[in-house]
Amino acid sequence: MEVIGKSVIRKEAADKVTGRAVYTHDVHTGKMLSVQMVISPYGHAKIVSIDTSHAWKVPGVRAIIAGKRYPLTGEAIRDRPPIAVDKVRYHGEPVALVVADTPAQAKTAADLINIQYELLPVVNSPTQAFQKGAPLVHERLGEYKKEADSHPVPGTNIATHYKIRKGHMDKGWAESETVVEASYSFTPSDHAAMETRCSTAEILPDGTIIITTSSQAPFMAKRLIADYFDVDMGKIIVRTPLVGGAYGGKASVQLEVLAYLASKEVGGKPVKLLNTREEDIITSACHIGLDAKVKFGADRNGRIKVAEISYWWDGGAYSDKAVDVSRAGLVDCTGPYDIENVWCDSYCMYTNHTYAAPFRGFGHSELSFAIERTMDLLAQKLNIDPLDLRYINAIKPGDTTPTRVKLNKSNVGNLRKCIDKLKELIHWEEGAIKEVDERFIRVKGVSCSWKTSTIDTDAPSGVILTFNRDGSINLMSGVVELGTGTKTILAQILAERLKMDVDRIHVRMEVDTQTTPEHWKTVASRGTFMGGRAVLRAAEDVIQQLKEIASCVLKAPKEDLEIANSRVFLRDDPTIGLHFREVGHGYKYPNGETIGQQIIGRGSYILRHLTFLDPETGAGRPGPEWTVAAYAVEIEFDKRDYTYRLIRACTVVDIGNVMNEKAAIGQVMGAMSMGLAFAGRETFYYDELGRVLNPQLRTYRPLRYGENPEYLVGFVETPQLDGPYGARGVGEHGLMGMPGALGNALSIAAGVSLHHLPLIPELIWRAKEAAK
């Protein structure tokens, strides 16, 4: 292939490195009012009174919204008031909005609003939420409007309970000679995207609502606002320019609703709501937490016969996307292993924490930590090499997933090839442990993962192609460019199909829901797959139109024509043909007569054969394919003070087919860095009132420059036949195995089994002390 697989420079690269790139906060439409939130200082409390009298005296204040009842919001379950009334359910929840002429005036007024609270008991973990008699986060859970596949349990803190019931558990335990069981936990954390969330809103005199937002889901924002407030969907325009990182955190719809309400309160004037870093961490959706229990049974040869798994997801105060994450964790609950008998319960729990959004990997890095630590415990108990144990149990064509989908050579990658390549890259034959001296030891830990994309069964993706008069092509897709380079990949797919120069394809980066074809959401590593399929359909549409016009001019049947190098020509005599510029807007004869018209190509795609899950057994087809990967992390551990240094990290992923080599490597490396930061340091620390104690980057501590290890990336290529040129998505997969691999390495190095994240020296010390 001429373009696919090549390291093409990203279409938006020049704007980003020169500072010309436009993000939501850079967009100005004349004078814009500023919105400031007042947020809850407690995790759970009744709102006794709100006094705004002093705030109204601040010059420039245009509106104060507090105590108003609006329609409840949320996707799976409508359980979240846009602005809290009656009580607050998490630290950081919006309680009031101030709209003023300037940010300073809005902030001054917001600080003068006096709110009296009465403290309520706090639910500080999903395990606590699950206990009988736990304080209820939602007393009226049974009254909320919900989606058909959401199953809240009134009178409890269970937002939804999903189940897998596959095989026969009694048979599995009877065949098992070795059993391991362990529990795991970690609290929520942040996505820490470089760009904090921002939304603007304006309501025109004719009622048209214009929202600009840093979002992964502009079309969902449009749909939900129309639904929440009974507005004609055609009257809502959502625009999304470049997004400065998202990682799932900008898939939730929150600031868009608040900005709309603020604009409505001031007569439709344009307003802007920009999160501070602290607000972005605690007020907007966070990375989900998890408590888990895993039990495996295996025969003497290491073949896993049975798995009993429980996941309690920390969905936070509102269900939002946490319900979907708990379902995604269920469908791939076993990790990438063929297990005949599986019993899994996946609970989405309400707690008094910030509500959860998807996080890169959509529940899979979280469950992989629990599964992969248990795999190492099993390997130790059986005295089997940990990679050999994974090789023995690796999922493969002919096996079935926990939801009973039968796999084939197209819809599942080759995990055993990934393991073999990983062994080569990390020199596994040298051994997992190397003594440096009496104080330091170097250890390699390994893990594996897999993932399918559990998205809406009717999720669409569309593409429009238009020709410029010079023969170049404009490509419009609803995929949001948020740092993944997906829109460049779409241009490569089009260039490959039309056999033309990729630089002659111009990609529109901004998404406008009024003029851009819909793409469901830019999540779940679906941009390349779904957008790519739509591009290929649009390309076929264009090819047929080009040949239709050219066949009349060249007096040749369409089947004799070929397309390449921006030309339509006779396949048997390429010298006879026409350039795209001659036919892209119709062909004009020397006498002025014109035939044809501007060529506009369109293509759309919806994933096929997806189904809901059976509520009793979990049977169903949740996604189109399963991407597999193998990982390793090498550390240098200080046996005296339990500190450690990251030496190298490795990921080998079955990518189907490499579309853009450097972009793919960059995506995997970035994901690995996020995975190590999540595993090694990133977390929220809560007090007894449910307050986040580290809501700034200086105390939250993501990885800094210079703290990263050497990154090794390898690819295995098992083409997915229904993917664009065989490709699978890869944006998330570098992250998913990092927590498990790091946990396994540190458990070996410290000589104690580690079951909690983040893996900081204090945790290791506490585990060592407990073991004594």
Image (cartoon, grey):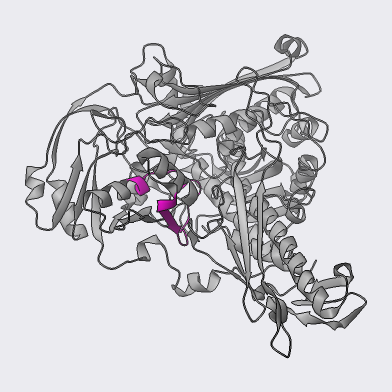
Percent of width and height locating residue 548: 78, 69
Q: Tell me if residue 235 is in the magenta stretch.
A: yes
Do we see residue 772 in this rendering?
A: no
Residue at image location 80% in from the left, 31% down from the top = 392
Tally of numbered discs: 0
State the image coordinates of residue 593 (x, y, percent, origin top left): 70, 84
Comparing 593 with 366, the one in front is: 593
Please report the bounds of the magenta region as a residue range: 234-257
Tell me if I can see residue 181 in this picture. Answer: yes
126 and 530: which is toward the camera: 530
In this view, 127 is above or below 553 = above
Report the side of 26 relative to 448 (left or right): left
Q: Residue at x 32, y 37 (%)?
A: 692
Q: Quadrant of residue 463?
A: bottom right
Residue 643 horizontal/vertical position (percent): 49, 43
Q: Residue at the spot x=74%, y=30% of the render?
A: 405
Q: Is residue 270 left or right of residue 58?
A: right
Q: Quadrant of the N terminus?
A: bottom right
Q: Is residue 160 left or right of residue 699?
A: right
Establish if 301 lies above or below 276: above
Magenta stretch holds residue 665: no
